[in-house]
Amino acid sequence: MAETILVPQEIRATRREELRRAWSRFRSSTLALVGLGIILMMAAAAIFAPTIAPYPQHAGGFVDFANTFQPPSRAHLFGTDDVGRDVFSRVLFGARISLSMGIVVLSIALAIGVPLGLIAGYWSGWVSSLIMRITDVFLALPSIVLALAVAAVLKPTLTNAMIAIAFTWWPWYTRLVYGEVLSLKQEAFVEASRSVGAGPWRIVFKEILPNTWSPIIVKLTLDMGFVILVETGLSFLGLGAQPPTPAWGTMIAEGRIYMPANWWLATFPGLAIFLTVLGFNLLGDGLRDVFDVQIEQWRGGA
Amino acid sequence: MKRFTGLLLMLVGVLAFPWGAFSQAPVTFTYIEQQIITASDPAAAVDESSLIAAINLYDPLLYPNVEKGSMEPRPHVAESWTVSPDGKVYTFKLRRGIRFHSGRELTAEDVVFSMERALRMKKGFSWVWTPVLEPGRIKALDKYTVRFELKEAYAPFLGSLLLFFILDKDLVMRNIRPGPYGEFGDYGSAFLERADAGSGPYRMERFDRATEMVMTRFENYWRGWKPNQISRVSFKTVTEEATVKTLIKSGQADMVNQWLSVQGFQELKQVPGIVVKEDPSVQLFHLQMNTKKPPLDNVKVRQAISYAFDYDTAIQKIFLGATRARGPVPVRVPGWNPKVPVYTRNVATAKRLVAESGVPPERLSIEYAYVVTLPLERQIGLLLKANLEEIGFKVEIRGEPWARIVELATKPETTPHITAIFDTLKYPHVDSHTYGMYHPSCWGTFRCMSFYENPKVTQVLEAARRAVKPEEQMRLYQLAQELIVRDAPSIYVANPLHRIAFRDYVKGYRYVGLLGFDVAFYDFTIAR
Amino acid sequence: MSFRTYLLRRLLHIIPALLGLSILIFVLSRVVPGDPARLALGPDATQEQVEQLRREMGLDKPLVVQYLRYMGGLFRGDFGFSLRTRRNVAQDIKEFLPATVELTTVAMLFAIALGVPLGVLSAVRKDRPEDHISRILALIGVALPRFWLAILLQLLFAYYLGILPTIGRGPAPPVRLTGIYLLDSLLALDFRAFLIALKHLILPAFALSVGSLAQIMRLVRANMIEEMRRDYVLAARSYGLPERVVIYKYALKNAFSSALTVIGLSYGFLLGNAFLVETVFAWPGLAFYGVDSLLFKDLNAVVGVTIVIGVAFAVVNLLVDIAYGYLDPRIRYET
């Protein structure tokens, strides 16, 4: 079997070349660009919420009972709610909650899931079987159901909702990395560094891990949308953020009772969720084509 | 693809066909309650939904005088009664010929059994009777005569019998299972989840705690039936307000409960065919402060909170009209003390009191809990949060389902700092909102989430109950109100309007102030 | 590896996973503060009564013993006592499960009945307007928060148009055989009841199905495009077989069987979302019951519901595997 073994410089050069090609493929996909645009918009909304929001103090426990149930107008783009707060400002601050929630949950999932996947994939033995059997346990339930069960034993707060979701999310990354490592460890470059006497930890983290990033990034992007759907679902059921936190799910739950006369209360936060999730899905699909990775995205969540 | 379209067309056609025209099903009256029926056993009923179930399935010994629009007790199962001069012995003559749903006649034995059962089970309203009664003090003198021998004179006794429901002794005893009550096992409480043991106008056809209780007319009901009365009731639990509104607007529901938001009722008023009835209520809306939980164990902190709250905004903007509460007793109840001190918003005083309390600022952190289905209570919470943060508090707001609040109330440790509660007069006596809320014997129920304890007040309340002379009785109840309000165990917010909505063909609705008794389906007729 | 060995292997994976799940959930439910015995007896019980009930419930035993007892009970159909409904959880589950089975099954049928034709259409008319529209609809379907869609559907069809009921399942058919209203009414030949049940199902089942619909559509489209490029399709065409036969008889059959695995996984998706959709539609199913139990912290019920859902999820996936094996015998099974 004749395989070319690349030296590090060559690998770097090839990677740069690959990146350039990937970017041009990405640019040609309108939908992916739209997705990226939506996400940048939402991220900007989240980061600059205190400056963009016309009434930043309305994100919290502000009340103004002289100004309740105002329909959308120039002063209040999305109208006002049942205690007189500006819904537009609250939706902007809601982006902060949902996006940071997604980031934190996925960081935790990565921090737990990836090392376990690397270990289980590279070494064989009872430890790796145990790790994989444990992921089976977690994946035996649709993630939202497990997250609900965990959230139920904790006090209903945003942090606890985050813990609950992260708790159910890491096994997906263990699975993903495990699969990647299994195929990568047969590759020539791994064999090569093994033959020059590199230790297993060095091989795993320096050689194998960098090569698993593309599927991980694609999955992370797609998962942002799913995590946000689960989080808003928990908040909607009252197991997440509590008033006056402007979480989108909570806003829908609170505004829902005033439907249909005051339709704007539940409509705009719902639109925000929809747009954000759509953005991440579009971007994720685009990245999937760019990196040409196949990953299962059929989870029992969201 | 064509075949698929064809199928779709067929489906649409079938759905559009007026199949309903062929139906001859009996008309069912649908009543919607937003809280689940926590107890189908009348001896365990305390909240509105459970009481409505009890009132329609069972008969209480006495009944409020709804015909006169009053909550004074009138004869019902008991036809007449006498009271001994020392106020300790009550003798009741029972009506003859009342049949239980089993067909058996209701007799004195059943009355004795039902009271002893309530006393032994110690659930529901038993706390009203335990101070003066115990098993053995209720005697059947003959088939139709019952005597209650109280330990001492007891002011609210007669009124409390409106809440004393009579069960079929034979039926219950045939269905006991192992349980905590010794020889009585579970006292039939598991059985009463599936069936009723009453003599009321309706019998339980089906009960599914989470969603629905179906009741059908009991043909041999002793008060008889007239045309146009309701023959079948679907008593549904639907928590979502939007859904409740849609159900009554579309005519899928005939009557909906009082727990809709004020805006919700405002909206229903605009709909042709729907009547929104408003009555001055004998209800108290207050925010109970857990006096066993720091920093609220400090009376100055509680007073400061009482001064900080913005009552005017609450009443005008959130309740859209209500009477400002003056103390725990609703202002329309005989025995209310007009001289009771009233806290009004005064931020300076509030700040001063906080400073005087000596509680360091970092300990001024409290939690407000509310019934998650009631947006009004969330709005009040947000208002309270804004008001208290002005004087240096940190406030967290938490919504909980009603059943969970009842559960939290069982212990001071689990009870939140502040809980919003609507509390209607439980029996037609001032005692309900004094003794019933501030005597330590009631601890553990949602009515007593302050866990208030003041030996002086306890003593006055006990004396008031024992007082035989009405003037003396009233003086003591009024004194108690004054003492309680000074200790600020609650933020007394409002005596709201009682609102309820029904379709205009429903006749005979009347509000008497006593929880649940307005939704007696027997009283309603349908005029289409 | 033969199909039978493969299935056996799958079972060997599922059983420890479900056991692990039961341990996980059981431990979770026991670390929560609060004394189930005290809760069950209410505030007036004496300490003595509480201790007695604790002994009766086995709460004084080590956690391992408690778990083993619980599992023992599970196999006898005893799921423990529900604090909220005051019945055995098994009884509650028996009552509420059929409604969820009905809803998720109908939702899945919706997803297949709409997703497969749309996927085929999209593949056949690749890069034409029909394709773009279907693909955009699919993207929207995945991104819509289901509970929000449910609310909007309620508003539109129940409130503004008034043509479909807002909540619940409607009256139960006269005879309860399976608890699945559609089946019960058909078995009793009561077509009126059948239609009422169907009307109640349309909105919640549709709201629930959109995600799976979109996924199935996308997968069928991708598979169809791949199949249409295969030699056998080209051959069939060159023999002059009508295009319809080529598409439906050959290409779709193969495309569909590989889409089948997704249906099993997507069922988990449906079960999860049922927790939100049943809440919005007050659909008296297991998920609705589960949400109420969660909010009430009725832990025996939570444990029972999650275990039943885990088992349902596993069983559906196994069934799909079997169906897959029959549809596509070429598959070689690897772990």
Image (tube, coloured by chain):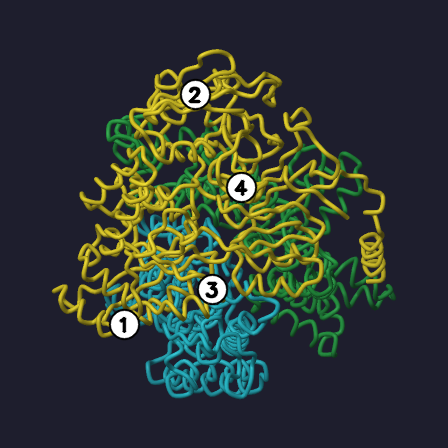
Chain colours: A cyan, B yellow, C green
Q: How far apart are marks 3 and 2 (CA)?
A: 45 Å
Q: Choose the circle earlier in sequence order: 3 or 2.
A: 2
| Residue B220 to residue A108: above or below | above
Q: How far apart are marks 1 and 2 (CA)?
A: 53 Å
Q: Which residue is identified by label 2?
A: B91
Secondary structure beneath disc 3? loop
Q: Which residue is identified by label 3?
A: B319
Contact flag, marks 4 and 3 (Cβ < 8 Å) = no
Classify 10 Å Cα crowding around label 4: few (below 14), some (14-19), many (20 and above). many
Classify 10 Å Cα crowding around label 1: few (below 14), some (14-19), many (20 and above). some
| Residue C50 to residue C130: above or below | above
Q: Choose the circle earlier in sequence order: 1 or 2.
A: 2
Residue type marked 2: Thr
Residue in the image at 65% along x and 55% along y: B248
Chain identity of mark 4: B
Residue A190 picture location, percent across and down = 34, 68
Q: Which residue is identified by label 4?
A: B517
